[in-house]
């Protein structure tokens, strides 16, 4: 079979003709970066769309994590999840913090507040939680732990763009949330990211840090870095923000087809929706290959690959299983995260999948189930 590869995700791309007039505007302005018109406009539009008071757009999500830690002056131990993309922990180490791993909740797949509380030591300064697959953390539970122990609470919301709660914006939780606009994310600017917060002074500090710490022409107030979003990225973001709801709706329809097809299969566990979520973003479609399924996860992964279906094991290995983190505090006892990492498989899910693509995935998984 010579099927074209079907990747786990493909970036949403509007027709090129729609980007061209924006490129002409950039050329005419001769302003390519350093807080140009498009970066400013994107911040305003994101604040509206995300119902977030303060937004700073940045070069990527990893720098967003580092700047959030720096702006909030986090040092010492930070309790975090092993079930995420490696950048979550790397950003802590780049920022001079010590990562401490705590286990996840088996339903939300996010940091378990009780496990976080048990991992606190006199050196703990902050919690760095992830809304994995865009599934909201127990934000009330984590905030209660943070408040009891005087800790900062930062959310890696790289997966959670556009997720809405019944109670309001998910982006309002914690001291700050970071977003990634990498090409693999639901909303992207090729590369890009943002920090969302409520505190105007915190945004001012982030904006200072993203431009080397410069205040005006002659004063440098802090050890900043270069984390600015350029005008090409920002213009692309302004363009695609207009079609993000359509992208999410297209993903929702595909996810519903998957659910209908896979729900009857034995040993293939689907995630159910979490209470209090008004809108999911369908950034990922994870399934869990358990004992009742005729193939184990890695055999299914290989079987799909042989048919050109490039599913991904997000998140395997656990971050705490990479060599540089094996000896980190907490890394040796993460039974729930380990079970998820050993059984998870993320299936292709993106707005541009056509009916035939979806049918191909469904047929391949069904065939495996009959093995
Ligand atoms: C993508 C991602 C990041 C990193 O974002 P970049 O924009 O690629 O730097 C951080 N955390 C999580 C959970 C991610 O998925």
Image (spheres, grey):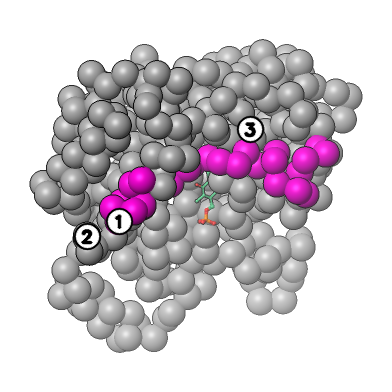
Q: Quadrant of residue 129?
A: top right
Q: CA distance from mark 2 to mark 1?
A: 9 Å
Which region shows up in magenta? 303-328
Q: Which residue is mark 2?
A: 1
Mark 3 / mark 2, whichever is N-terminal:
2
Q: Determine contact: label 3, label 2, CB under 8 Å.
A: no
Classify mark 1 as within 8 Å of ligand 1 or not, answering yes or no: no
From the top left corner, tell me how far across and down residue 136 is, in percent. Answer: 45, 27
Q: Which residue is mark 3?
A: 81
Q: Determine contact: label 2, label 1, CB under 8 Å.
A: yes
In front: 360, or 180? 360
Q: Which residue is mark 1?
A: 308
| Residue 59 in the image: above or below residue 252 | below
Mark 3 / mark 1, whichever is N-terminal:
3
User: Which disc, if any, is residue 284?
Assistant: none
Q: Is residue 323 magenta?
A: yes
Give SS at disc 2: loop
Q: Name the mark nearer the viewer: 3 or 1.
A: 1
Q: CA distance from mark 3 to mark 2?
A: 40 Å
Looking at the image, which residue is at 53% across and 28% down? 340
Looking at the image, which residue is at 52% across and 59% down? 60
Report crowding for label 3: few under 14, some 14 to 19, many 20 or more residues within 10 A (C-alpha).
many
Give SS at disc 1: loop
Looking at the image, which residue is at 77% across and 21% down? 119
Q: Is residue 244 magenta?
A: no
From the top left corner, tell me how far across and down residue 249 is, in percent. Answer: 18, 39
Give SS at disc 3: loop
Q: Quadrant of residue 211?
A: bottom right
């Amino acid at each position: 079979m010579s099927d074209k590869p079907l990747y786990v995700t493909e970036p949403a791309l509007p027709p090129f003709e729609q980007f061209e007039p924006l490129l002409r505007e950039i050329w005419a302005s001769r302003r390519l970066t350093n807080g140009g018109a498009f970066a400013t406009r994107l911040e305003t539009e994101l604040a509206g769309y995300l119902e977030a008071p303060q937004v700073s757009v940045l070069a990527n999500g990893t720098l967003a994590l580092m700047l959030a830690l720096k702006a909030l002056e986090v040092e010492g131990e930070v309790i975090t999840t092993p079930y995420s993309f490696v950048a979550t922990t790397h950003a802590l180490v780049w920022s001079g913090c010590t990562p401490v791993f705590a286990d996840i909740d088996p339903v939300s797949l996010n940091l378990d507040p009780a496990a976080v509380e048990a991992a606190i030591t006199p050196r703990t300064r902050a919690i760095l939680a992830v809304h994995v697959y865009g599934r909201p953390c127990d934000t009330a539970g984590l905030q209660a732990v943070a408040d009891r122990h005087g800790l900062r609470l930062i959310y890696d919301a790289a997966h959670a763009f556009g997720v809405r709660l019944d109670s309001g914006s998910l982006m309002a939780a914690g001291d700050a949330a970071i977003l990634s606009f990498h090409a693999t994310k639901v909303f992207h600017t090729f590369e890009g990211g943002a920090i969302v917060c409520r505190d105007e002074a915190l945004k001012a500090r982030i904006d200072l840090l993203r431009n080397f710490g410069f205040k005006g022409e002659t004063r440098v107030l802090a050890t900043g870095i270069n984390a600015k979003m350029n005008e090409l990225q920002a213009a692309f973001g302004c363009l695609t923000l207009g079609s993000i709801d359509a992208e999410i709706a297209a993903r929702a329809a595909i996810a519903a087809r998957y659910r209908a097809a896979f729900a009857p299969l034995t040993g293939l566990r689907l995630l159910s929706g979490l209470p209090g979520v008004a809108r999911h973003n369908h950034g990922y479609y994870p399934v869990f290959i358990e004992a009742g399924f005729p193939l184990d996860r890695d055999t299914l992964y290989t079987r799909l690959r042989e048919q050109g279906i490039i599913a991904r094991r997000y998140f395997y290995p656990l971050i705490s299983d990479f060599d540089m983190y094996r000896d980190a505090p907490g890394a040796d006892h993460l039974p729930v995260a380990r079970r998820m990492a050993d059984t998870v498989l993320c299936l292709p899910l993106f707005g541009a999948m056509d009916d035939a693509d979806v049918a191909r995935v469904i047929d391949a998984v069904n065939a495996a189930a009959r093995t």
